[in-house]
Structures are given as structure tokens and as C-alpha cells.
Image (cartoon, helix red, strand yellow):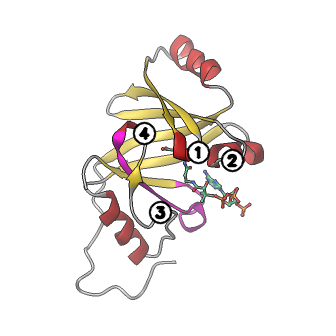
């Protein structure tokens, strides 16, 4: 899967600073928020609609990493399709990088298949882009950055 056509100009490696968030697909934000708050003792600090992704999100902070709960707003959106097929559960892992568009290009040069050729705006105003799970050993992978 690794692209053999790397040149001397290809940057060495992507620099990931931390796990930015873990995305979890849920049937109902309301019901899941109760579990995270009342059983795990976390605090939901934001709820946001990401209209173009057809999801409603809820965020919790655990150390420097967030948990992002994702409730589908439409059966034909990515979360609606995922839940129909696999049920609730971990949906994706998001890594923080300096520049999401550059990191996407680098991942593609190194053999990953991009869902997004360039970054776009996601929840919390981050620049985000996804790598297809078929090219990442089964884990839908998001790269995100505060700036571009
Ligand atoms: N993790 C692992 N595999 C996944 C997956 C996931 N989250 N989502 C889909 N797949 C697998 C499917 O099981 C399927 O596998 P098989 O071919 O073996 O059956 C394959 O990928 C294709 O799945 P599909 O249901 O036909 O879905 P699509 O090809 O239409 O879309 C994907 C798949 C990943 C491109 C799409 O879900 C996508 O663009 N995801 C990124 C966007 C997203 O998830 N947004 C929500 C998050 C919002 C945010 O954080 O801001």
C-alpha cells in the first residue's frame, strides 16, 4: 500500500501532535450524554450541528483529548449509514496536525486513499479531512488543524 514513488522532495513524515478526538457514533445524543455525564462523570461542553455532514455532535474533554459523540440527522449521511451497518460504536480517530491540507497530501503520497482532497471546515471550526478506512487498516482516520 505504501507508494514507492517517493522523491527526495517528499517531506519525511507527518507530524502528529496528539489525538485531537475520538468520534463515536450514537443513536441518540440525549441518551448517550447521560451515560458520559452520569456514569463517567464527564461534562458535555458543546453541542453543534455539522449540517454538511448530516450530524449533530456533542463534545467532552478528557485531558487534552476530546470525545465527539455523533448522532445522524439523516439515514443517508455517513453516520446514519455506519449505524445501519455496524451499530453504535467507535467511528473514527482524529489526529491533530499543523496543516490538514498538507497532511492529507502527504498521506496520499504515502499510499493512503483520501476521502477529502483538501481540508474543509468541521466541528469547532477546525480544518478537517478524512482518509478512507479501506486504506488505513479499517480505521476511518481524520486529520485536523486549527490553521492552514
Ligand atoms: N470505519 C471503518 N469502516 C468504515 C467506516 C468507518 N467509520 N465507514 C464506512 N466504512 C466501511 C464500510 O463498512 C464499507 O466496507 P465494505 O465495503 O467492506 O462493506 C466501506 O467502508 C464503504 O462504506 P459505505 O457504507 O458504502 O460508505 P461510503 O463509501 O458511502 O462512505 C466513507 C464511507 C468513509 C467514505 C464515508 O463514511 C465518509 O466520507 N466519512 C467521512 C465523513 C464522516 O464520517 N463525517 C462524520 C464526522 C463529522 C465530523 O467529525 O465533523
Whole-Å distance between the Cαs marked 4 and 3? 16 Å
Which residue bears the numbered disc 3? 116
Residues at badges 1 and 3 in contact (C-beta under 8 Å)?
A: no
Q: Tell me the SS state at disc 2.
A: helix
Whole-Å distance between the Cαs marked 1 and 3? 17 Å
Whole-Å distance between the Cαs marked 4 and 2? 19 Å
Q: In front of the other: label 4 or label 1?
A: 4
Q: Tell me the SS state at disc 1.
A: strand
Q: Mark 2: few, some, or many residues within 10 Å (few <14, many ≥20)?
A: some
Q: Residue at x 42, y 87 (%)?
A: 4
Which residue bears the numbered disc 2? 82
Who is closer to the viewer here, 28 or 125?
125
The region drawn magenta spans 125-140
Q: Is disc 1's CB within 8 Å of ligand 1?
A: yes
Answer left or right for 142 relative to 101: right
Which residue bears the numbered disc 4? 123
Amino acid at each position: 500500500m505504501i507508494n514507492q514513488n517517493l522523491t527526495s522532495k517528499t517531506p519525511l513524515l507527518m507530524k502528529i501532535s496528539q489525538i485531537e478526538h475520538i468520534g463515536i457514533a450514537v443513536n441518540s445524543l440525549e441518551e448517550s450524554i447521560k451515560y458520559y455525564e452520569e456514569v463517567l462523570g464527564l461534562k458535555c461542553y458543546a453541542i453543534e450541528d455539522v449540517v454538511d455532514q448530516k450530524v449533530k455532535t456533542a463534545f467532552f474533554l478528557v485531558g487534552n483529548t476530546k470525545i465527539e459523540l455523533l448522532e445522524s440527522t439523516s439515514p443517508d449521511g455517513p453516520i446514519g449509514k455506519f449505524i445501519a451497518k455496524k451499530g453504535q460504536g467507535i467511528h473514527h480517530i482524529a489526529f491533530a496536525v499543523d496543516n490538514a491540507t498538507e497532511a492529507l497530501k502527504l498521506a496520499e503520497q504515502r499510499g493512503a486513499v483520501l476521502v477529502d482532497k483538501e481540508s474543509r471546515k468541521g466541528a469547532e471550526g477546525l480544518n478537517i479531512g478524512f482518509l478512507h478506512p479501506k486504506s488505513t487498516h479499517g480505521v476511518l482516520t481524520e486529520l485536523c488543524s486549527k490553521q492552514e
